[in-house]
Amino acid sequence: MKRVLFSIVMLLAAGFSFAQEKDVKQAKSLAEDVKPNFTEAEKLINGALENAETKNQANTWNVAGLIQKRINEKEIEKAYLRQPYDTLKSYNSLYKMFGYFLKCDELEKTPNEKGKVKFKYRKDNAATILTERVNLINGGSQYYNLGKNKEALDYFGMYVDLASAPMLEKEQIASKDTLLSTVAFYACLAASRMNDYPNAIKYGLIAKKDKQSGKDAMQLIADAYKAQKDTANWVQTLKDGILAYPNDNYFFGHLVDYYSNANKLNDAMAFADQMLAKDPKNSFYLYVKGYLCQSMKNYDQAIEFYKKTIEVDPKYAEAYSNMGLVYWTQALDYASKVDFNSPKFKAEQAKINKFYESAKPCYEKARELKPDNKELWLNGLYTVYYKLGIGGAEFDELAKEVEALGK
């Protein structure tokens, strides 16, 4: 009795498996018909893709890809006939097709019962992918322009990933494709917009080879490492960025900020000196050197380097502002040591005022250069006028601006 039951179960299983394989064949037939029924074909193949009896068969995924290929062909046919057609539907069918063909190839790599690997579908599917792969850029661009970053990342990412797909390894795409790093940059950018930091790094590392977008890609990589609190890779990326783009302030500035915030001013100073040795007339490096001296309370050196900054770039408003702050800080430091009851108080006050008098033209120049950036000069200039007893309409106007800024 048990044998009979077992036989019945086996027959039922075989029948069910046969039914699923029949669905795969029918799905293919419906898609290849002169008047294809894609709705029914997709319904049948989607069931087969989930069914335990057929989901691990390479043919199932191959047919799924062929159905999507036919859907795309029909949309393109409409375009040739100047009939209304759906571009996104066309692109989406290709995107699905690539995924199905990749899965088909993955399953074909599995050795059979004799331990052999036979690729039945690889040659044809690889040829189709090579022909249609460029359309992933078009689809990705359309989604990118629509502000749909996830879909844009899917398309651009697929384009890049296919370059290293095992089924295309003979083509050596990565070494031939001149668009690869550019498309990788847009994948990185789309990922960054979604705070998808792993993918921003993944595609950014490819995109940094691009001549036009390499610098921006490295910035996005650095931002992604920082967001992930991966300090080691963040700092290393900043250093690599400085070497690759020594004239860009982003990498050097952020590295100095890191050293400053981590209380590693000596390391920051050593790095600043290293960069100045390479480019002694770089206004930004000179400014940073002054800033570090100021942070370390080496005020005379700070003023020296701010002046050197201004010699190279007379319109460097931040250098004027910081130099004014140095004089202001010196005034406060000196005042903190003065005995107000001392007979020498007037003489000491005169020395304090000299610091404020030195600060005054610095803040005024910063205001002249960047009148809208009031953080550079407003509070400093107001304090200087107040300390020096400068009144009148100009002081009253500064007072109103300070009051308005505080609200």
Image (cartoon, rainbow, N blue to C red):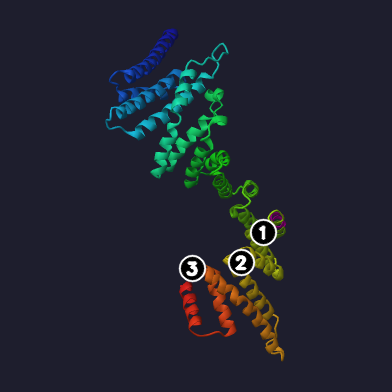
Q: Give the side of residue 49 with respect to residue 256, left or right.
A: left
Task: Specify whether residue 60 is painted magenta.
Answer: no
Task: Specify whether residue 272 is painted magenta.
Answer: yes
Taking depth in this image into account, of 110 and 334 the one nearest to the observer is: 334
Residue at the (51%, 30%) spot, across then down = 162
Q: Residues within 10 Å of mark 2 (few under 14, many from 20)?
A: many
Label 1 or label 2, whichever comes before in sequence order: 1
- The disc placed on residue 281 is 1
Q: Which residues are magenta?
A: 270-275
What amino acid type should be assigned to the residue bearing mark 3? Asp
- The disc placed on residue 387 is none
Determine which residue is flagged by label 2. 319
Taking depth in this image into account, of 349 and 117 the one nearest to the observer is: 349
Q: Tell me the CA gap for discs 1 and 2.
A: 15 Å
Q: Tell me the CA gap for discs 2 and 3.
A: 16 Å
Do the residues bearing badges 2 and 3 touch, measured as CB atoms within 8 Å? no
Q: Residues within 10 Å of mark 1 (few under 14, many from 20)?
A: some
Which SS does the magenta portion mostly show? helix
Residue 205 higher or lower than 167, as above or below: below
Residue at the (72%, 59%) spot, across then down = 266
Q: Position of residue 234 (x, y in %)?
A: 62, 48
Q: Tell me the CA gap for discs 3 and 1.
A: 28 Å
Q: What kind of element bears circle 3?
A: loop
- The disc placed on residue 372 is 3
